[in-house]
Image: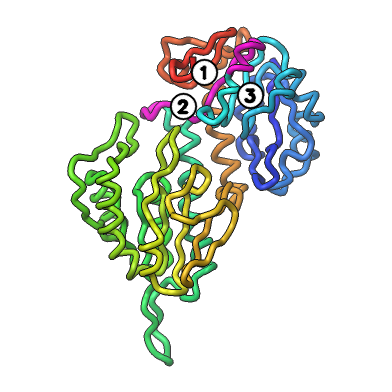
Amino acid sequence: MIISALKSSESSDTRSPIHLETLQALIDLDTSIIFERGIGGGIFTDDDSLENLGLKAKSREECLSLADLIITLQPLKVDELNIVKEGATILGMVNPFNNTEHIESCKEKNINLVSMEFIPRITRAQKMDVLSSQANLAGYSAVIESAKHLTKGLPMMMTAAGTLKPARVFVIGVGVAGLQAIATAKRLGARVEAFDTRDVVEEQVNSLGAKFVKIDLGETGQNEQGYANELTSEQIQKQKDLQSKVCERSDIVITTAQLFGRPAPKIIDEQTISKMQPGSVIFDMAVESGGNVEGSIQDQIVIKNGVKIIGISNLTSSVSSHASLAISNNFNHWICDFFDKDKQCIDFNFEDEIIKSSVLVYEGKILNERFA
């Protein structure tokens, strides 16, 4: 069996789907491993370092045409799918709701397609959860990037010139990214507040030393995967009105609210921005899916009334080495858990919950009912 790892197709994404510190797991499977030349450029890993471990550098076309299993950070283009051999498997980040053409093409060309975004949120699958591993690092990076643009320091400082008050940070959305943002801001000495539509996360917020902002929105809750339920238009407006008061007193506001497969909800409007202090910062972590902040633009910094609105895509690329280590481990765990070493192939056992959830296309059929 030949496993092929592809270089990121987006110039702004400097991660790699393989990492020197995690490769042994794949090497132990006794498969042939090839990789696209220059794959480790964003994490300061040259081709020779990988070839010294027994891997072989190839062109992108060779990686596509020779592989039985392709590991990728982005969905392939239609013309690239024409090169992939029939019966091969693509494992990676598919962005399925925005790439239905990709799914349909895999069906027509009899290419198996596994979406790492559809890994179920169960205990056994945590080691494969790419969304969580990358969101964790993104939450950290959001705080660091925000601090760069703030004209204040984050911690309280006792100086001969006087006492400098700690910066106030407000995190909206307490998922994986939000929790890491809270923890990072606290470690840097900021005074942190947080809000989430799910009251059950209050204990987690408090355990990190932050204050949970209570806003009574009525019935909210979360779904079986642990994601917050979508709010009604009335609930969103009430949330905007009440959290606006917290934004007014905050130096940094970080928004993390995203809905899997849907545009991000707009939770900070221009009216709220107009009340914030000049020099304060809003970091929109949902900018790639439409944005939480009115006026945020992907990969740009917009200034409104002296408030910086930051929208950075591929946020984990700012910590590309750790991001690559984490996501390569996610890929490796999926492969190793379902690899039949005797037959040298992936065992697609659809009785397994992880296989059933993550495999979108198999043997020319679209299996997930949302895309069938």
Q: Earlier in the sequence, mark 2 or mark 1?
A: 2
Q: Is residue 331 visible?
A: no
Secondary structure at numbered mark 2: helix
Residue type (three-letter) at the residue carrying disc 3: Asp
Q: Are marks 2 and 3 in contact (CB under 8 Å)?
A: no
**Which residue is more in the foreground, 291 or 49?**
291
Measuring 38% from the left and 56% from the top, which residue is drawn there?
Answer: 268
Label 2 and label 1: CA atoms lie apart by 9 Å
Question: In this image, 6 relative to 305: left or right?
Answer: right
Q: Are marks 2 and 1 in contact (CB under 8 Å)?
A: yes
Q: Which residue is mark 1?
A: 360
Camera-side mark, 3 or 1: 1
Secondary structure at numbered mark 3: loop
Return the mark for residue 118.
2
Bin the neighbour count of mark 3 within 10 Å (Cα to Cα): few under 14, some 14-19, many 20 and up: few
Q: What's the colour scheme?
A: rainbow
Q: Which residue is mark 3?
A: 28
